[in-house]
Amino acid sequence: MGAPLVVVGDSLLDVDVSGQVDRVCPDAPVPVFEAGVGTPRPGGAALAATLLALSGHQVRLVTAIGPDEAGRRLRDLLRAAGVGVLLLPYDGGTPEKIRLITDRQVVLRLDRGCRVHPVGAPGGAALVALAEAPAILVSDYGRGVAAHNEVRRALTTAASSRPVVWDPHPRGPGPVHGLRLVTPNERELPVADQPSVHADRLGAVARRAAGARLLWRAGAVAVTLGAQGALVCDGSPAPLMVASPLHADGDACGAGDRFAGVAAALLGEGALVSEAVAAGVEAASRFVATGGVQRYEQRAGLPGLAPVGLDAALAAVERVRAAGGRVVATGGCFDLLHPGHVATLRAARQLGDCLVVCVNSDDSVRRLKGDGRPVVHEHDRAQTLAALSCVDAVVVFGESSPVEVLGRLRPDVWVKGGDYNLEHPRPGQAMPEADRVRDWGGQCVLVPYVAGHSTTQLIRSARRAGRDAEQRSPR
């Protein structure tokens, strides 16, 4: 195994406090927030490092953390996530950002301990980690780590021989020169657009990004545009627009860290900037669409993909249960994925906090469907499902029924599509998994069937179209 990725930057302790707002204070016209239990999590560069570690990467974090209670909690969280921490000398407090959340909506943020204190020079272990890392992500939050002269010298040296990605902050220093990629949002672009008759947003962003690239002497600048994706300027005649491949409507906190981390990891593996940015956009969109930082501890698997395999699924299930979440599972052949499948998966995901999809192996499908099936190999079927935003893990099983794998996963809810009643119309006929699921107190649920969609119909239509085309072709 190679050297770990390195994340450099300012770390925070974030705390999400869920509660209810259902009345107004009698002595002032303000809402009353009834707080529940607060959930601490890493923030800033610590979140970027944690998300990479939860995606299976070896990660070291070069940062400053205060010798206080907030710092102790943050170090414990990083240790639990498997992040190796290399601390810079620092006697200040650890900043805390506390978000009050009701119905998944942030209603107020309370900051404390945010006074900036001087950061000391990196030690030998940190300098060695920077020198050996296959890729480095600088996650700057404007608190001094990225501004330290010795840190900047080490980053400049590293950038001459390997990918360094810099995620800037408005209060932070400018990136060092020679970086492979800088990932600002619009607010973080330093170059103002010149007055022009062209008032379109993308044109203005492209001009500012091109100016920033020259100012920073960077190989490329990828401006993140939220739900729109990212715009890349790399010196080509025209910018590259990387659109988000899925709708992501939710808490965007941490999406930039996810984007920059995935991009840095892929650049370290030899990917092109365009490939790294595309993967980063997809991963950030998926991150937001599936709950964002409010469920960060459930993230695992390949960048932008749900994990595939029983061990990875069990790990994801364990994390969800440890956080008090509900595990949902469903299963099927999923040969030639169609809108009916997607509707079932989306409906299933709404019933809990994690969806595991159990997929019949090729041999299992042949036993159930006969020769000629499946059309799509089990590996490809699993990877296609893993790319869906509503899927958190995929398991391929070889038996005719998923009873055995369900005994390992023990989901709280087992979901079948409503077409099960069409295939098994006899009243009172139980699905074979029902008794097994009830053994541990689980529940079986049917979700609505989307009429007009089935794999068998698709295959018949394709074969009919092929025969018709063959008959029309000249002999």
Image (cartoon, helix red, strand yellow):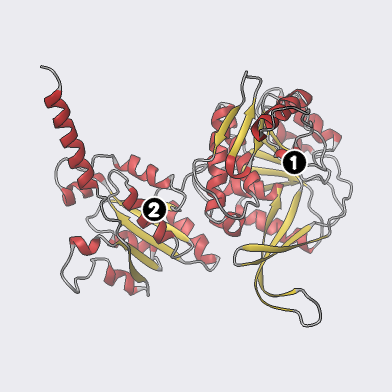
Q: Position of residue 442 (x, y in %)?
A: 37, 72
Q: Is residue 381 visible?
A: yes
Determine whether, in the image, residue 157 is placed left or right of residue 343.
right
Q: Position of residue 416 (x, y in %)?
A: 30, 62
Q: Nearer the viewer, residue 225 or 468?
A: 468
Which residue is farthest front? Answer: 197
Q: Quadrant of residue 160?
A: top right
Instruction: Tell me: residue 130, above or below residue 101.
Output: above
Q: Nearer the viewer, residue 149 or 446?
A: 446
Q: Quadrant of residue 156?
A: top right
* Residue positioned 33% across, 59% down in the render: 405
- The residue indicated by pointer 1 is 187
* Residue positioned 75% across, 35% down in the render: 189
Which residue type carries mark 2? Leu
Pointer 2: residues within 10 angstroms few (<14), some, or many (20+)? some
Quarter of the N terminus within the rendering: top right
Nearer the N terminus, badge 2 or badge 1?
Answer: 1
- The residue indicated by pointer 2 is 310
Pointer 1: residues within 10 angstroms few (<14), some, or many (20+)? few
Determine whether, in the image, residue 148 is placed left or right of residue 21.
right
Q: Position of residue 28 (x, y in %)?
A: 81, 77
